[in-house]
């Protein structure tokens, strides 16, 4: 089910601050500057589809925004994800890694939030998918060649992705969750083909059966992150495959299945530690909720991943 945010009732002078806070809390910490128009139709709709987050943003006439990630924001939050956008209406200018491009309706863009970038736009409708890099199937060096460029949405896999992404956005609240998950799988696979095609390479996506099974693994992990018994062995049993076959599926992935479980749990903990509604919840309770039953172990792996303890992260985040 999607969640919709609108600025109805928010004073015009406060709308940029309002949108900056909403985007940073529910999507990704971003710097947002500019001027919000008076159009009450402006909205942000977001939904989680397993490990994928979909967002659809609409800005009305009279708006002019510049958004991006600064080194400070990257230091405070550097998720191992990539952002793939499909522009539905309007014009979007993207800049990253010294490259700049202008996108027209139907075009795709790729952004790495782990490095500084800027997007500027006025009245647009844009769909953006936040996808774990591990699910794209390209190396970091290859992904680095896709930033700040236009990916045409009028031919090949780009055209198919450009058509499927809006369909996914429209289906989130209309279809059963199982069908939405399958459609999400199809969209990510087509996006991966389109990205590989933009590089002039053959698709890095594995065979259909293996890729479908991988998505089932990722989805199962997401559903059971809070279960302390989640492990490669329990995943293999749930999917009726051997442990050896599960490990083989992950041979082409950037991380092992155990590393992915730990990474996603830590990312969830970071989100909860940043959540103002959970400021009074003990750090150890947050760790335990996401499967870290030992407080000392939670503190150690959190520090190993982010160079600060959970308590220090929460304190820094409050400043």
Image: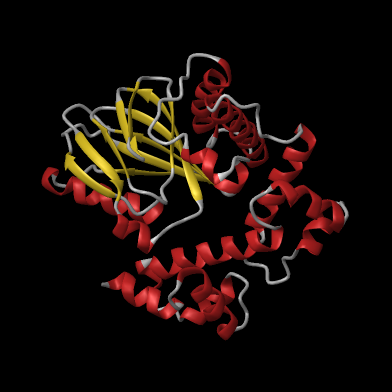
Report the front residue among 201 and 119: 201
Colour scheme of the rendered structure:
secondary structure
At a point 29% along the width and 52% down the height, the residue shown is 70
**Up/down of 76 relative to 141, above or below:** below
Q: Horizontal placement of 272 versus 125: left or right?
A: right
Most distant residue in the bottom direction: 296
**Up/down of 122 relative to 240, above or below:** above
Most distant residue in the top direction: 155
Residue 9 shows up from this direction = no
Residue 65 shows up from this direction = yes
At a point 34% along the width and 49% down the height, the residue shown is 23
**Up/down of 55 relative to 107, above or below:** below
How many dots with numbers? 0
Quarter holding residue 193: top right
Residue 71 location, x and y as percent?
31, 56
At a point 11% along the width and 46% down the height, the residue shown is 13
Residue 152 location, x and y as percent?
46, 20
Viewport quadrant of the C terminus: bottom left
Q: Horizontal placement of 72 versus 239: left or right?
A: left
At a point 58% along the width and 76% down the height, the residue shown is 288
Residue 93 location, x and y as percent?
29, 29
Residue 225 location, x and y as percent?
63, 63
**Up/down of 189 relative to 242, above or below:** above
Report the front residue among 268 and 151: 151
Report the front residue among 246 and 64: 246
Most distant residue in the left direction: 13
């Amino acid at each position: 089910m999607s969640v919709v945010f609108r600025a109805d009732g928010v004073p015009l002078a406060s709308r940029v601050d309002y949108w900056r806070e909403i985007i940073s809390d529910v999507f990704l910490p971003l710097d947002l500057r500019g001027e919000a128009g008076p159009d009450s139709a402006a909205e942000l709709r977001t939904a989680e589809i397993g490990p994928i987050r979909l967002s659809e943003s609409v800005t009305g006439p009279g708006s002019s925004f510049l958004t991006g990630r600064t080194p400070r924001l990257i230091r405070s939050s550097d998720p191992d994800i990539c952002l793939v956008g499909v522009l539905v209406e309007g014009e979007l200018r993207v800049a990253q890694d010294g490259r700049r491009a202008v996108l027209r309706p139907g075009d795709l863009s790729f952004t790495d939030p782990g490095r500084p970038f800027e997007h500027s736009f006025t009245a647009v409708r844009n769909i953006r998918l936040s996808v774990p890099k591990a699910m794209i199937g390209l190396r970091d060096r290859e992904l680095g060649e896709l930033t700040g460029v236009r990916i045409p949405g009028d031919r090949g896999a780009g055209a198919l992705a450009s058509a499927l992404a809006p369909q996914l956005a429209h289906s989130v609240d209309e279809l059963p969750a199982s069908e939405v998950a399958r459609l999400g799988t199809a969209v990510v696979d087509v996006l991966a083909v389109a990205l590989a095609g933009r590089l002039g390479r053959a698709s890095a996506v594995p065979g259909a059966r293996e890729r479908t099974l991988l998505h089932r693994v990722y989805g199962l992990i997401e559903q059971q992150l809070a279960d302390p018994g989640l492990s490669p062995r329990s995943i293999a049993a749930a999917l009726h495959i051997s442990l050896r076959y599960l490990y083989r599926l992950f041979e082409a992935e950037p991380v092992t299945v155990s590393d992915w479980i730990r990474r996603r749990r830590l990312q969830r903990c970071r989100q909860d530690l940043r959540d103002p509604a959970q400021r009074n919840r003990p750090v150890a309770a947050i760790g335990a909720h996401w499967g870290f039953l030992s407080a000392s172990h939670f503190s150690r792996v959190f520090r190993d991943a982010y160079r600060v303890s959970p308590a220090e992260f929460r304190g820094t985040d409050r400043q």
